[in-house]
Amino acid sequence: MKKKLIAIDMDGTLLNKQKQISIANLEALKEAADHGIRIVLASGRPLTGLKPYLKQLGLWQKQEFSITLSGATVQQNKTNKTFAQNAMEFKAYQRFYNFSQRHNCHIQIQNNHSLYTTDSTLSHWTTREGKMNLQQINQVKLAEIEALKDVYKMQLIAEPEDIERLFSKISPEVKSLYQVLRQERYAVDVLAPEAGKGNALTQLCELLNIPIEQTMAIGDGTNDLSMLKTAGLSVAMKNGKDVVKETADEITDSNDNDGVAKAIRKFVLK
């Protein structure tokens, strides 16, 4: 079946280890767009962190959309208008703030324009996130977090060697209340239960009147699983997690070997 939309994860998928889009990937995506196929970046990043790549791809236009913050929001690229959103309640932050205090880890939250933390001392990983996503870092008090109405993504931050232990300390009961994901090597991501790239893809296809069967999704990480299960055709990266490769319909080459371009040429531009 002809594909009308391709949803593509960024880090570990479209971007190589140097955080760049290869020439082969760029050419394949532009060729697909020239054939009238919608290209949708679907990332754990906020829109600010996608903007340079959207401009490079020629997608920084008001008729184009992105799935941001691991599917918590669907946004129109140039206008920043939000068409779908799944915000988190303050009590969720309170729960994980208390957890961070008990287990001596950092905590931060994101919306699509800023990053916030109640930590008095910034983690170097928080500084990295702010720089990578072109976001201002706001050190605030707990009461200021309560006033925010657009908290979409929460992260518990620790050193990579401690993150698995931290993840294991979160009870099954709490994990059943939220989407709790191991994505970055230094973070545990927490999203609202209705959030996720799969639901976001469904909502976007309804908005654009595109049958879900006519979509292809490409990803490598656990936050891509719902999107891969939802899309008409799912493709995992060779460098992806085992559970992702087991879930996907097909496996393409790695992010350092133009895996996205190869998938597009094999399954869409054939």
Image (spheres, rainbow, N blue to C red):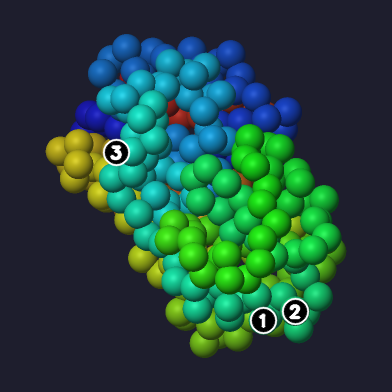
- Label 2, residues with CA under 10 Å away: few <14, some 14-19, many ≥20: few
Tell me the distance, in whole angstroms, between the alpha carbons under discs 1 and 2.
5 Å
- Residue 156 % position (x, y): 68, 66
Question: Mark 3 vs mark 1: which is more N-terminal?
Answer: 1
Q: Which quadrant of the structure image shows residue 48?
A: top right
Asked where in the image residue 194 lies, by quadrant, the reply is: bottom left
Q: In which quarter of the image is the N terminus?
A: top left
Amino acid type at circle 2 is: Gln
Q: Do the residues labelled 3 and 1 touch (CB within 8 Å)?
A: no
Total number of numbered discs in the rendering: 3
Marks 3 and 1 sit apart, C-alpha to C-alpha, by: 41 Å
For discs 2 and 3, the disc positioned in front in the rendered view? 2
Mark 1 touching mark 2, by CB under 8 A? Answer: yes
Residue type at mark 1?
Answer: Asn
Report the disc number at residue 101: 2
Q: Mark 3 points at which residue?
A: 215
Q: In this view, does 7 lie above or below 32?
A: below
Q: Helix, strand or loop at disc 2?
A: helix
Which residue matches tag 1?
A: 98
Q: Say which residue appears at 20% left-offset and 36% top-offset.
A: 208
Determine whether the residue tagged by mark 1 lies in a helix, strand or loop.
Answer: helix
Q: Can residue 80 be seen in this view?
A: yes
140 lies left or right of 124:
left
